[in-house]
Image: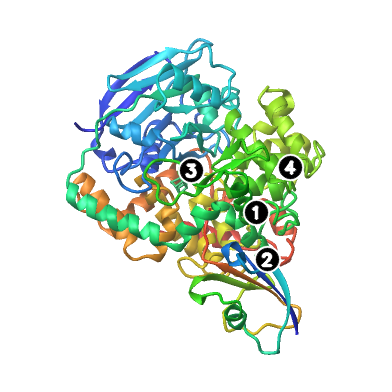
Amino acid sequence: MKITVKLFAYFRENRFLREDQDLPAGTTVGDIISSLGIDPEEVGVTMINSRHCALDQAVQENDQVAIFPVIGGG
Amino acid sequence: MADKIYRINMSTLSTAVEEVPAQWQGHGGRGLTSTIIAAEVEPSCHPLGPGNKLVFAPGLLSGTTAANSGRLSCGAKSPLTGTIKEANAGGTSAQLLARLGIKALIIEGLPQEERWYSLAIDEQGITINEETELIGKGNYAVIEAMGQRIGAKTGVISIGQAGELKMSGANISIKDPDARIRSCGRGGLGAVMGSKRIKYISIVPTDKKVAIADPEAFKAANRTFAKALVDNPISQALGQYGTNVLVNIINEAGALPTRNFTTGQFEGHEEISGETMYDTIVERGGKPKHNCHAGCVINCSQVYNGPDKEYRTSGFEYESIWAMGADCCVDNLDYIAQADNLMDDIGLDTIETSVAFGVAMEAGVLEFGDGAGICRMLSEEIAQGTPLGRIIGNGAGSVGRAFGVTRVPVVKNQAIPAYDPRAIKGIGITYATSTQGADHTMGYTIATNILGVGGSVDPLSHEGQVELSRNLQIATAAIDSTGMCLFIAFAALDDANCLPALIEMINARFGINLTADDVTNLGKTILKTERAFNQAAGFTNLDDRLPEFFSQEPIAPHNVVWDIPGEKIDTFWDF
Ligand code: SF4
């Protein structure tokens, strides 16, 4: 199952900005986060295809998964 | 010594020092400017005529050691919106005024003659002086001249050419500790200062301190408060990336208004993002962290250098970068930095003016993406006051009317900022109902709609948006009265120690006993005072609506329109 993972802010350091991944069916957003060695405590927002999602949501073929640390502005 | 009101009458060129009336005692910042405008300005007056007043007020905690408390509020009837208006900014002036015991400056009347003036404030009081040399010059020339004439630490509040020309996009600039500029940006308050023919106000620092009723309690509360700010992860991210960290997340959410609000994602988002900006700043020897006033512990500002490693701009905010970037399709931070600095110097609101450029691009005045063209038109048209420059300098609504464009993103004639209300519905409620025209800072629902701060409310649903906006607008009106930077709100929403410590500081400063409910009631009273002014000026619930095109043109990628009915918007005021 092909999906795209996008990282933002300091999550990009020593990782990547955007990467295509081939993952087994049933993989969740939380699984992707652990596989990247990101502390789930530091995760602020996750989105699949531009919609907010929970960490236990499973990803589907061609999904775009975006992972942000806790950030703010205004 | 009790704080005083300084009243400056520009019709008679006279000044007076007054006691603070009892009913104004508990107010500061926005609460005070709005209370004074509501009490003393006829709502139907012409904003640039003799009946309008320009009021400056430091916040309740400004001038103390409280972290992040150095915001100065400026209020008047707005020439852009016709509503009551408050805009606040950092810089050094709020702290200097508060330490001089000045609770507010009220500037009224209009000079009889075509001369320009300045106001000089020091420990002896206030004087009105004629000014000739700096007329027609930008804000940086004023700041430099004050440094030479009076001293490097002089506080400066000034207008550029845009304010002199009474443009509705003109802002008021406040000098920061590095002799750079922070802006009371929105609503054309610079034009009101220009109408009163005041080019600048200088403030000589004093050694006096703000009196604190209970210094020990104050110190303890400030320690807790500052710790809540510093420990908050959002504060830390603001220090690294500035507010511009938002470009990528708002783009990802499909709510980054692009190409004059025709789509919700910008192809060039990476080029203008906070991440790119951070790397560029570090590479060119700029400063990713910088504060707009002493005492800020968040440091969301920065110093951005050009490819030659020379200074280009500071206080490089998300909304400014979005407006010139995505909305005008300029995918180059160097052009955006140059335009940002030019707007600071000319004294223009970066949101209003850049959104006006987006509308002008749609009208064919210049091409989308023409960053060099924006910079050229800023210096050669707007700063010179040519007819085209005045049309753009008067804001997005002005450009739409002049060129017959119907896609004009304004509410109450003020440009909508960096979050599309079709894809983030809570902010649409704020734009529609704000007492001051479209303004994200009035009730920043992005925190909860997008960032997951203070809970979460689905940005595309109708549910919970009115309540969210209402609660945030009430809290914001109260925070805007304290002199606090609004970015304390992230810690306040997240950390149970933060707000009680803030209230404790107010109590210790004045020797009073406010509760959290009192603070909420203060916020409600301010909103109602502001709304009553607007109603008396002729505004009705039908003005609390978004422009028609938002309900007719779906925005990609979610392909959604603005569809919250008017009756539901009106329930905002049920409190
Ligand atoms: S966080 Fe930013 S806007 Fe707020 S006081 Fe600090 S530098 Fe100024």
| Residue underneath mark 1 | B276
**Percent position of residue B222, x then y:** 28, 52
| Residue underneath mark 4 | B359
The chain carrying label 3 is B
Q: CA distance from mark 1 to mark 3?
A: 45 Å
| Residue underneath mark 3 | B535
In the image, residue B568 sits, relative to residue B111, either above or below, namely: below
Q: Residues within 10 Å of mark 4 (few under 14, many from 20)?
A: many
The chain carrying label 1 is B
Q: CA distance from mark 2 to mark 4?
A: 33 Å
Give the camera-side residue of B261 and B38: B261
Q: Amino acid at mark 3?
A: Gln
| Residue underneath mark 2 | A17
Q: Are marks 1 and 3 in contact (CB under 8 Å)?
A: no
Q: Amino acid at mark 2?
A: Leu
Q: CA distance from mark 4 to mark 3?
A: 29 Å
Q: CA distance from mark 4 to mark 1?
A: 27 Å
In the image, residue B156 sits, relative to residue B300, either above or below, namely: above
Labels 1 and 3: the sequence-earlier one: 1
